[in-house]
Image: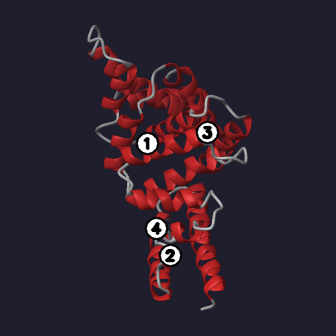
């Protein structure tokens, strides 16, 4: 109840950004008020607060937390990567809502330790598999914003992928979309380079179905565009193998 009262008050003062900030901060206050002296970290409180359900504000904060882990993975913070994240959030949620999310993150969450395992445990139990694949694509897109995906960033995304319960072949498929090598097309289609033409065609049909944009119609526009990009990469991989094999 307190959360919604805080959200209403926040909206009356600062419109939509105030509503988001009021709801999230009131939820944190409720948990911390009941747990004084318990010695629990902010991450423990925040995680318990979101176990019941994932609100849009919660999801955005979790996504931003994972993005932060990837950006910091190689020991340096790229401005192009930061710009990519901000542009993505503005495109997905609008400028006011994105600014409210960044404000809460910078004032509260960023100052505490971010636990990828706890965040991913929640997302794994509350999101569809297709959505988690798109989260991986989003994280690789961040790391590629400066024109290079480092080994450290790849390792961090692989770690997050494991926590999200994503199959390794699916991780390798999305990873191959950001690396150019002789086997990239095969990895995108999740087959070996020894596959027959018939197996290549079957793999294309399977991957086209898996990555079809319709799978993410329930998500925001930016996610749907990411799905379209994955789908296009699958098509390009298949066309490349068609040309190389002559079928």
Query: Would you name the residue on which mark 1 appears?
Result: 159
Q: Which mark is residue 208?
A: 2
Q: Sequence order check: which comes first, mark 4 or mark 3?
A: 3
Q: CA distance from mark 4 to mark 3?
A: 24 Å
Task: Tell me, yes or no, whether the two marked residues, 1 and 2, touch with CB atoms within 8 Å.
Answer: no
Residue at image position (65%, 82%) is 244
Viewer-side residue, 134 vs 175: 175
> Image height check: is 208 above or below 170?
below
Q: CA distance from mark 1 to mark 2?
A: 26 Å
Whole-percent x, y for residue 9 in the image: 50, 26
- Badge 2 crowding class, 10 Å Cα cut-off, few under 14, some 14 to 19, many 20 or more, is some
Q: CA distance from mark 3 to mark 1?
A: 26 Å
As helix, strand or loop, the secondary structure at mark 2 comes to: helix
- Badge 1 crowding class, 10 Å Cα cut-off, few under 14, some 14 to 19, many 20 or more, is few
Q: Residue furthest front?
A: 194
Whole-percent x, y for residue 162 in the image: 38, 47
Q: Sequence order check: which comes first, mark 4 or mark 2?
A: 2
Is residue 5 shown left or right of residue 152?
Answer: left
Query: Would you name the residue on which mark 4 appears?
Result: 215
Is residue 22 shown left or right of residue 230?
Answer: left
Q: Sequence order check: which comes first, mark 3 or mark 1?
A: 3
């Amino acid at each position: 109840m307190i959360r919604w009262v805080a959200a209403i008050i926040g909206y009356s003062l600062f419109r939509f950004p105030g509503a988001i900030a009021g709801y999230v901060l009131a939820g944190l206050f409720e948990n911390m008020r009941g747990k004084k002296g318990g010695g629990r970290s902010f991450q423990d409180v925040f995680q318990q607060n979101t176990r019941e359900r994932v609100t849009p504000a919660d999801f955005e904060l979790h996504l931003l937390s994972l993005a932060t882990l990837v950006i910091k993975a190689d020991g340096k913070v790229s401005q192009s990567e930061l710009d990519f994240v901000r542009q993505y959030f503005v495109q997905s949620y609008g400028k006011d809502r994105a600014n409210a999310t960044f404000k809460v993150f910078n004032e509260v969450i960023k100052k505490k330790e971010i636990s990828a395992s706890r965040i991913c445990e929640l997302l794994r139990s509350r999101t569809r598999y297709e959505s988690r694949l798109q989260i991986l694509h989003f994280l690789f897109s961040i790391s590629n914003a400066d024109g290079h995906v480092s080994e450290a960033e790849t390792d961090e995304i692989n770690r997050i992928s494991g926590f999200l319960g994503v199959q390794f072949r699916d991780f390798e498929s999305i990873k191959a979309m950001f690396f150019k090598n002789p086997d990239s097309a095969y990895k995108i289609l999740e087959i070996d380079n020894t596959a027959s033409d018939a197996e290549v065609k079957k793999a294309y049909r399977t991957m086209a179905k898996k990555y079809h944009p319709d799978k993410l119609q329930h998500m925001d526009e930016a996610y749907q565009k990411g799905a379209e990009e994955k789908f296009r990469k699958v098509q390009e991989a298949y066309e490349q193998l068609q040309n190389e094999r002559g079928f």
